[in-house]
């Protein structure tokens, strides 16, 4: 099994280029199902999850191949509207094909995603929204069976903002008959990117990025070309890596406006940053100040960065209180951080972190993408050697993170096979 071996200490310095967004690429790859023919996607990150989505598209009948930093996807001959359990259980985002398959074929058989380390991941909003559009949906043997002769526009109101449910309903609504209004829609930049791509395919969508999206159904969509936006969670990861090591890092090819909540929180910790166009420069501090955190829906502080902020607070001066309103149980990283000498108390879904002078290296285990990234953060500053196992989780969401960190001066290497 592969692992990362990190020797803590070096302050990071230098320039890092941010890759395309995993969470924008995956729904856009699914959206290509709606336009029979060739779509060219630029700046697609080379990740395990992208490979999984490509495998799923091939199962459905598409051709998918890498072209430089992009993908060529040809959905002309898609004919098999199914997403099997063995794929969906490894990547929840496989569920994104439900809406497009229903929109193109009028039927779909998609496995229910399993649970995952960050908590229960229901899909009730997806099902409620598709039923509102007139789909008949039944659950059979762990699969969602969806059918609709002709989807009809409707008003869909979500109890809480959901990236996946907003994406799936939007992708089903773009060729439905009439108008669909989605209320309490997610405002995440990845949803806006998906809407922009669908508009390039011929969809009529207004209001993406706000909590009310209006979609005018059209008869059919065509293939389109597009470029994937920078990954805001990777941007946050390198901001926090610079902060935790007290380094000076230039983060290039990012969208500073997509990480405002993280910038504000780091400023609260006393960190200095300068923003320019598509770059952020972070200047190291001797010791990070403590700052409480409540992770909430976009544009609030993202749940995906909460584990990394928790790692940063482990060596802050003072104590901090951290909770996550999106995934309240998302604290599997706490026990592993405590193995490195952190002092984190977890009670009633709230983590209280007492900052310590120093962490000490030890063997730890990644449980999901961002918990793994949090352990990498801690390993960068822990005295001695930290070994992180199950790094396949990290590879799902980060493009060769050890190479990017090594280029910034970190002592990190990948070992084993
Ligand atoms: C997306 O997951 C991201 N994944 C997650 O990133 C991210 O943590 C999450 O959004 C929240 O920002 C991708 O984009 C591929 P949601 P998603 O539907 O769409 C509840 C990573 O590390 N909910 O926005 O599955 C849900 O329980 C991954 O890159 C329902 O109750 O999340 C949560 O509390 C991890 N019923 C809230 O909504 C539903 O039917 C938001 O979840 C759907 C969601």
Image (cartoon, rainbow, N blue to C red):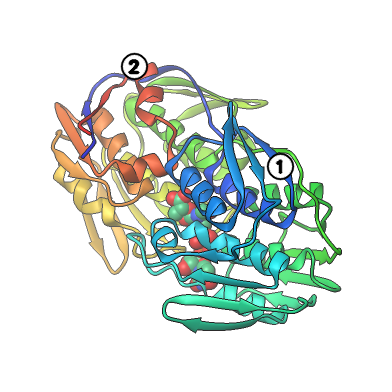
Kindly check if marks 2 and 1 are in contact, taking CB atoms under 8 A apart as contact: no
Is 146 rendered above or below residue 341? below
Query: What residue would you read off at disc 2?
Result: 409
The span from disc 2 to disc 1 (Cα, nearest Å) is 38 Å
Query: What residue would you read off at disc 1?
Result: 39
Q: Which mark, residue 383?
A: none
Q: Which residue is at the front of the view, 152 or 33?
A: 33
Is 147 rendered above or below residue 288? below
How far across and down, in percent of the image, does residue 191 sit? 65, 53
Is 186 rendered above or below residue 194? below
How far across and down, in percent of the image, does residue 417 sit? 23, 34
Work out whether residue 156 can be spotted.
yes
**Mark 2 or 1, nearer chain start:** 1
Work out whether residue 356 can be spotted.
no
Q: Secondary structure at mark 1?
A: strand
How far across and down, in percent of the image, does residue 332 sit? 27, 56
Residue at 75%, 52% in the rendered image? 198
Q: Left or right: 287 with respect to 145?
A: left
Comparing labels 2 and 1, the label whose residue is closer to the camera: 1
Residue at 50%, 82% in the rendered image? 139
Residue at 82%, 56% in the rendered image? 203
Q: Quadrant of the N terminus?
A: top left
Q: Secondary structure at mark 2?
A: loop
Q: Left or right: 215 with respect to 338?
A: right
Is 154 rendered above or below residue 387? below
Tell me the quarter of the picture where residue 308 sits: top left
Q: Is mark 2 within 8 Å of ligand 1?
A: no
How far across and down, in percent of the image, does residue 339 sit? 14, 45
Q: Which residue is at the front of the view, 280 or 224?
A: 224
Q: Residues within 10 Å of mark 2 (few under 14, many from 20)?
A: some
Residue at 55%, 38% in the rendered image? 231
């Amino acid at each position: 099994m592969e692992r990362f071996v990190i020797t803590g200490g070096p302050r990071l310095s230098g320039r890092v280029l941010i890759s395309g967004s995993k969470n924008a690429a995956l729904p856009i790859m699914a959206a290509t199902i709606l336009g029979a023919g060739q779509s060219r996607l630029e700046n697609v990150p080379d990740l395990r999850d992208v490979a999984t989505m490509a495998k799923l598209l091939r199962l459905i009948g598409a051709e998918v191949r890498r072209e430089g930093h992009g993908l060529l996807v040809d959905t002309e001959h898609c004919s098999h509207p199914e997403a099997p359990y063995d794929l969906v259980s490894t990547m929840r985002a496989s569920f994104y094909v439900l809406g497009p398959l229903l929109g193109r074929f009028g039927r779909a058989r998609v496995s229910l995603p399993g649970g995952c380390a960050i908590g229960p991941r229901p899909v009730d909003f997806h099902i409620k929204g598709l039923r509102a559009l007139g789909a008949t949906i039944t659950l059979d043997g762990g699969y969602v069976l969806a059918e609709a002769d002709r989807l009809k526009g409707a008003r869909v109101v979500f109890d809480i903002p959901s990236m996946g449910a907003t994406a799936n309903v939007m992708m089903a609504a773009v060729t439905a008959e009439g108008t669909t209004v989605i209320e309490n829609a997610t405002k995440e930049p990845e949803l806006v990117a998906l809407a922009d791509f669908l508009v390039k395919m011929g969809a009529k969508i207004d209001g993406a990025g706000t909590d009310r999206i209006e979609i005018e159904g059209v008869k059919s969509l065509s293939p389109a070309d597009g470029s994937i936006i920078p990954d805001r969670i990777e941007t946050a990861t390198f901001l926090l890596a610079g902060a935790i090591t007290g380094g000076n890092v230039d983060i290039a090819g990012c969208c500073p406006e997509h990480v405002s909540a993280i910038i504000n929180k780091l400023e609260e910790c006393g960190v200095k940053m300068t923003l320019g166009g598509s770059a952020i420069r972070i200047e190291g501090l001797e010791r990070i100040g403590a700052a409480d955190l409540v992770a909430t829906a976009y544009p609030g502080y993202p749940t995906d960065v909460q584990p990394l902020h928790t790692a940063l607070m482990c060596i802050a001066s003072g104590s901090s209180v951290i909770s996550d309103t999106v995934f309240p149980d998302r604290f599997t990283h706490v026990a592993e951080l405590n193995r490195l000498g952190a002092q984190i108390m977890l009670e009633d879904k709230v983590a209280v972190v007492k900052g310590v002078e120093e962490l000490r290296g030890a063997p730890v285990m990644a449980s999901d993408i961002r918990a793994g990234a949090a352990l990498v953060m801690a390993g960068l500053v822990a005295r001695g050697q930290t070994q992180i196992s199950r790094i396949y989780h990290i590879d799902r969401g980060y493009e060769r993170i050890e190479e990017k960190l090594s280029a910034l001066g970190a002592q990190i290497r990948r070992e084993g096979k």
